Amino acid sequence: MTTCSKILSKTDTSKALSLPTKFFKYSLPSFNGGHAVSFKAKDESGFDWTFKCSTRKNFKCSTRKKGHPKPVLSKGWLAFVRNKKLKVGDKITFSVLDPTAAVPSYGVRAEKVQAEKVQAENVQPSYGVRAEKVQAEKVQAENVQADKVQEDKVQAEKVQAENDQAEKVQEEKVQAEKVQAENVQAEKVQAENVQAEKVQAVKEVKIFGAIFGYSPIIAPSIP
């Protein structure tokens, strides 16, 4: 039996600690015919505690109802209890760190079972509150994202409308310039036609005068 655990009773926390006889018989140093033996046990922080295991019949906590001596930890134990602030319901565990060693080394670990239970009870409500807070934050984030998507959509539609309007204005401008150019070209062609007709008329008058032997009076050219 290399480990032994026990939930502490009122007697354990106020007087002395009793543990199963097998643990002391097979795991602790031999009593060598005596009634007490001291040993050291290292706690989780690495500190060595010195305990005295006793089987004195006159010790109040060392005798069973039938009169058989029961090993208990007396010396050093209450100092350990005070240091670890152990209460009824907490857990203590002794262990043999190296059972094969010529001189066994021991470990002792205290667990604040009651404190952990209270903490767990306190954590559960806070976890529920935390979960609700996380859910609320998630919903808020989703709403913010939805608002942003809507704003982006509106902005995109606005930009698209402005682009469409700009393209329409540009098309109208190009069309107006095209019409203007066509009108200018038409006027130019018209003017050229008028001028050609005038030149042709002058030629005909000159030819007619040459045939009939007189010089026709030609009206001055009209610009």
Image (cartoon, helix red, strand yellow):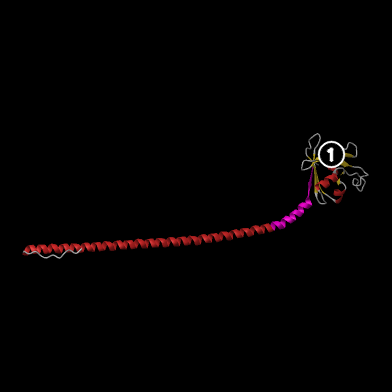
Residue 206 in the figure: left or right of residue 127: left
Disc 1 marks a residue whose amino acid type is Phe
Task: Work out which quarter of the rendered image holds the C terminus and state it.
Answer: bottom left
Give yes or no for residue 151 being in the magenta stretch. Answer: no
Residue 203 in the figure: left or right of residue 42: left
The residue drawn where x is 76% and y is 52% is 116
Among all residues in the image, which is located at the extreme left? 213
The residue drawn where x is 23% and y is 62% is 189
Can the viewer see residue 177? yes
Q: Position of residue 184 (x, y in %)?
A: 28, 62
Give yes or no for residue 113 being in the magenta stretch. Answer: yes
The residue lying toward the viewer, choosing from 91 and 28, is 91
The residue drawn where x is 47% and y is 62% is 158
Q: Position of residue 83 (x, y in %)?
A: 81, 46
The residue drawn where x is 72% and y is 58% is 125
165, above or below 13, in the image: below
The residue lying toward the viewer, choosing from 212 and 111, is 212
The residue lying toward the viewer, choosing from 185 and 168, is 185
Q: Quadrant of residue 131?
A: bottom right
Per the rendered image, the range of residues in magenta is: 108-128
Q: Position of residue 183 (x, y in %)?
A: 28, 63
How packed is label 1: few (under 14 Cα within 10 Å), some, or many (20 or more)? some
| Label 1 sits on residue | 39
Element type where label 1 sits in the image: strand
The residue lying toward the viewer, choosing from 8 and 166, is 166
Can the viewer see residue 19? no
Among all residues in the image, which is located at the extreme front? 220
Q: Quadrant of residue 127?
A: bottom right
Q: Position of residue 51 (x, y in %)?
A: 85, 41
Task: Work out which quarter of the rendered image holds the N terminus and state it.
Answer: top right
Residue 169 in the figure: left or right of residue 123: left
Residue 129 in the figure: left or right of residue 178: right
